[in-house]
Amino acid sequence: MTGRSRRRDAFTRLLPVGAALAVAGLVTAASIAPMGAVQSSYAVSFPRGETAETQALEILAAAAHFTTRDAYGATAKPVEPEPASFAFSAPAAGTPDPGTAQAIAYDIVMAMGLGEGEYSCLVALWNRESGWNVYAHNASSGAYGIPQALPGDKMASAGADWQTNPVTQINWGLSYIMGRYGSPCAAWGHSESYGWY
């Protein structure tokens, strides 16, 4: 094989990779610029009918995972996976004693359609945070109540009786968990990983 043939074969093998990288560059440029500011097109021809479609799709998927948009534009950076993306579970909580804060939470969780596993995660989470004490107060941080809201008066959005009513605190706490983590088990997983939620 001549030197020229080797160079042509190497070029032929690298062409799909180069095309895929060009596509990734266009995707990154388009995500950084304001909408409509980048108008790009490309045309790549491949010898022997080969295409880089599969490689381009893989690169596009990778770019989506590593490009984030904030208030100032887009930044390309590795995105650390949230524990919520993993399956977490807690030991089974069992049936709560009637009339307790845990029994109230059980009824609310079941009414939300979350199930026993999510209830068990909630029990484990709030056992760690407050021991299910409506009056639990962390003097160093100011966190308050069963869900350890920080500051405690955030719970006023769920009711004026937020300082004393377990229903108000549980409703606020579940609303916070669902909004931030998507489920009690995801919040429990975050707490397991970081020591807080």
Image (cartoon, grey):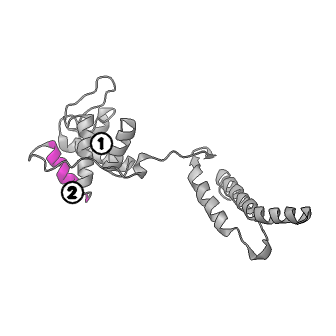
The kind of secondary structure element at disc 2 is helix
SS state under label 1: helix
- On the image, the x and y values in percent for residue 29 come to 70, 53
At label 1, counting other C-alpha atoms closer than 10 Å, the crowd grade (few under 14, some 14-19, many 20 or more) is: few
Query: Of the residues shown, which amino acid type is indicated by label 2?
Result: Met
Compared to 64, does 170 lie above or below?
Answer: above
Q: Nearer the viewer, residue 66 or 86?
A: 86
Q: For the view shown, which residue lies furthest in the top direction?
A: 140
Quarter of the view holding residue 52: bottom right
Task: Report which residue position mark 1 lands on.
Answer: 157
Q: Is residue 153 left or right of residue 3?
A: left
Majority secondary structure of magenta residues: helix
- Stretch in magenta: 101-113
Q: Residue furthest left?
A: 98
Q: Residues within 10 Å of mark 2 (few under 14, many from 20)?
A: few
Residue 181 can be seen, yes or no: yes
Is residue 85 located in the magenta-colored stretch of the structure? no
Question: How many numbered badges does the structure rendering display?
Answer: 2
Percent x, y of residue 84? 40, 49
Q: Position of residue 25 (x, y in %)?
A: 71, 55
What amino acid type is highlighted by mark number 1?
A: Ser
Pick the residue in front: 152 or 109.
Answer: 109
Report the disc number at residue 110: 2
Which of the two labelled residues, at mark 1 and mark 2, occupies the earlier sequence position? Answer: 2
24 shown above or below 48:
above
The quarter of the picture where the C terminus appears is: top left
Instruction: Give the spatial CA distance, label 1 vs label 2.
Output: 23 Å
Instruction: Tell me what residue is drawn at x 36 percent, y 35 percent.
Output: 195
